Image (cartoon, helix red, strand yellow):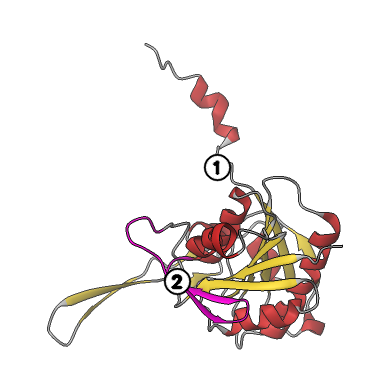
Amino acid sequence: MMKTRILLTNDDGITAVGLRELEEGLRGLGRLTVVAPDRERSASGHSLTLQHPLRIDEQGPGHYAVDGTPTDCVFLGVNQVMRHERPDLVISGINRGGNLGDDITYSGTVAAAFEATLLGIPAIAVSLEYEREYHFATASRVARKVTEMVLAQGLPPDTMLNVNVPDLPWDKLAGFRVTRQGKRFYSGVVRENVDPRGRHYYWIGGEVLPGPAAVDTDAALVRRGFVSITPIHLDLTNHRALAALAEWEWES
Ligand code: MN
């Protein structure tokens, strides 16, 4: 049988510890190829670079750094680096920080997995929630287990898995749960300050607030110590709103 081909990427950059831990954790499951941004591109969303050329820097066997976004990395990974040997699976992560609830629309980690889904390749995004010290070894074992499951079971069409791991030692995990996307609550912070030249600058980024979380959501289950596995698809249609909108008198 042909060896399974797995494309790895992230949004924290090719030197990030999470990517190294992911690669370690998956060793032996197939041939691993890394195509990742040459620097941190967190919160770059699903952005594709169309206005300037991109470079692919081969840094070692099977390791390629791209001066673009995570989406660029998957696009170039599939359509250029691995064009003669299309990956069977794309895994993005391990992100430094959870991608829970509304985070996923900003996330470069999740966007990379979305891009793979668009290209017809099963994909997994893995993120590690931060509490105190980033237990990457736990997330690495989780990534291996989820990958083994996906390789054995396959994924339904147009589905990717958004996996979030609590910041705990492996033996302290409460278990694995399939969840739905929840809500995250941030304090709406813009910090205003003055730079050394006397100009005002603004720093975006609030703190995560506890907030009311429904019990079966990604955020709630990770908070309770469970690995959260959310199947996500690309259809953004609000199906619950279709009937109401169709009632409007569009042609009056
Ligand atoms: Mn990141």
Q: Is mark 2 within 8 Å of ligand 1?
A: yes
- The answer to whether 186 appears left or right of 150 in the picture is left
For the point 68% across and 61% down, the residue is 87
Q: Mark 2 near mark 1, Cβ–Cβ under 8 Å?
A: no
Crowd band around label 1 with a 10 angstrom C-alpha radius: few (<14), some (14–19), many (20+): few
SS assignment at label 1 = loop
Q: Quadrant of residue 109?
A: bottom right
What range is drawn magenta here? 49-69
Q: Position of residue 47 (x, y in %)?
A: 43, 57
Q: Quadrant of the C terminus?
A: top left
Residue 66 in the magenta stretch? The answer is: yes
Given this view, does label 2 or label 1 mark the residue nearer the observer? 2
- The first of marks 2 and 1 along the sequence is 2
Question: Relative to the observer, which residue lies in front, 23 or 45?
Answer: 23
- The answer to whether 146 appears left or right of 188 in the picture is right
Most distant residue in the left direction: 198
Q: How many marks?
A: 2
Question: Relative to the observer, which residue lies in front, 21 or 241?
Answer: 21
Residue 113 in the magenta stretch? The answer is: no
The amino acid marked with disc number 2 is Arg
- The answer to whether 201 appears left or right of 222 in the picture is left
From mark 2 to mark 1, how far is it between C-alphas?
A: 24 Å
Q: Position of residue 169 (x, y in %)?
A: 74, 85
Q: Which residue is mark 1?
A: 236
Q: Position of residue 168 (x, y in %)?
A: 71, 82
SS assignment at label 2 = loop
For the point 70% across and 61% down, the residue is 89
Q: Which residue is mark 2?
A: 41
Most distant residue in the top direction: 252
Up the image or down, 34 lies above or below 134; here it is above
